[in-house]
Image: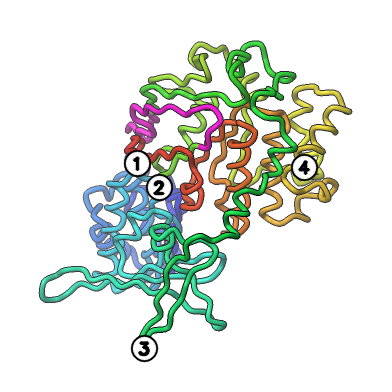
Amino acid sequence: MGFGWQQPARNLLTYLSARENVELPMQLDDVKTTVRSKRALELLDVVGLADRADFRPDRLSGGEQQRVALAVALANNPPLLLGDELTGQVDSESALQVCDALRAINQALGTTVIIVPHDPLVASQVNRVVTIRDGRTSTEIRRRRSQEDRIVHEEEWVILDRVGRLQLPRAYVNTLEMRERVRLHLEPDHISIWPQEGDERQVMEDKQQSPVSHMWPSAGGRPFDRLAAPTVSEAQSEGIGVSITVENLTRTFELGGKKVHALRQVNLKIPAGSLTVIKGPSGSGKTTLLNLIAGLDEPTDGDVRFGERSLAGMSPQEKIDLCRQQIGFVFQTFGLLPFLSVEENVQVPLRLLLIPRQERRALVDEVLEMVGLADRARHRTHELSGGEQQRVAIARALVKRPTLILADEPTGQLDTLTGASIIALLKDIASQAGVTVVVASHDPNVHEAADRLFELKDGQLVR
């Protein structure tokens, strides 16, 4: 079988041309030189890169590199090609070219192609889509093209497990605003299902007070003042959270002599104390935007305003102080230190701020109670579930009482139920504590919880 990866460099050697890269697996299999050369050119032609055969990877775009990598994976004519996030680092136009290459591979070579994408654009281009949630297949879409009118006909199926459980497509649930309970009726040849109005249990749950509300002072209490740096104190004058303004933000990288526009003239305003979500496919610029908001990267053009202050007007040391004192970070991969206990991990930001030991302990105890991990304080990270590790990461982000939390795919490695608890916690942090929370996420559940939702596509804000 052949393998394709999100990073095409895993299949390519930078000092070889495209043709030489495709020939290499055949050479290792003792294929004759003339046969190797002919097949390499044939494969490059299938993926639409015959005219790039003598180019090295540094002269190719990201999409072209990925198509060469697919040709490399097919060098020894495997009957099966597996691809993991093949379009995760390319723009929409390049993603469509990769999809065209996969279709050509399937049709010209008869290769079975199985890919794992986040990108809905890719999912819309294939014959069959199987959705997996919480380790189970949940839905399946089958597409076929009519031989007569060439129209694509689509059917959607829900997978029924052995005990009769099924997961309805999310679009259906959202459209009908289904919650905990739905009504069913058995018809002669089908089952009818619709939402039940006036679910008293949900009303009661909505009225329940979040742990944040009684463990964390209200916005008017300004609980972060003791850690506030003088250079950003004005950001807190109106409460806990800080407003973020992005003005004509552009970030361009140089790759192989070509310019890659990670962000292009992005303008948005994030209110203080809101839960704002940035959505978009992989490679759309979400993480780049978070890095620029945090001052971890320099824009090619444009500016970010943290409250009333411009990041462009800050010195390098002021930006370091801003990150240490005012911004909490939450990552998809948690970023915990495995040789420290839970409470020691949460203490790390406070140690950098030289907070006295007694005060550190009080702050750590408070946030661990808030995220429901007080009884796990002395455990090592390997003794925790994925959801618990992410809660530790959130506690670490909260412990210094920041004005802004930036979270990059916080539910990306969690099952649906655990992810929902993390979403609820972030929502409470924004609504109850008044902290500004900005999340970059693929997760539709996160999108639903947002006070404001922005979408990036190919580095541009589309809504």
Residue 130 falls left or right of residue 235: left
Q: Are marks 2 and 3 in contact (CB under 8 Å)?
A: no
Judge depth for marks 1 and 3 and give the one in front: 3
Judge depth for marks 4 and 2 and give the one in front: 4
First reached walking from the N terminus: tag 1 or tag 3: 3
What is the magenta segment's predominant secondary structure?
A: strand
Q: Secondary structure at mark 2?
A: loop
First reached walking from the N terminus: tag 4 or tag 2: 2
Q: Are marks 1 and 2 in contact (CB under 8 Å)?
A: yes
Q: Position of residue 9 (x, y in %)?
A: 45, 48
Judge depth for marks 4 and 1 and give the one in front: 4
Judge depth for marks 4 and 3 and give the one in front: 3
Q: Position of residue 16 (x, y in %)?
A: 39, 47
Q: CA distance from mark 4 to mark 2?
A: 33 Å
First reached walking from the N terminus: tag 1 or tag 2: 2
What type is the residue that disc 3 sits on?
A: Pro
Q: Position of residue 363 (x, y in %)?
A: 79, 32
Residue beneath the point at 59% across and 37% down: 431
Q: Are marks 4 and 1 in contact (CB under 8 Å)?
A: no
Judge depth for marks 2 and 3 and give the one in front: 3
Tell me the quarter of the picture where residue 162 sits.
bottom right
The residue to which callout 3 is attached is: 188
The residue to which callout 4 is attached is: 368
The residue to which callout 2 is attached is: 281
Q: Is residue 56 visible?
A: no
Toward the viewer: 90 or 144?
144
Image quadrant occupied by the C terminus: top left
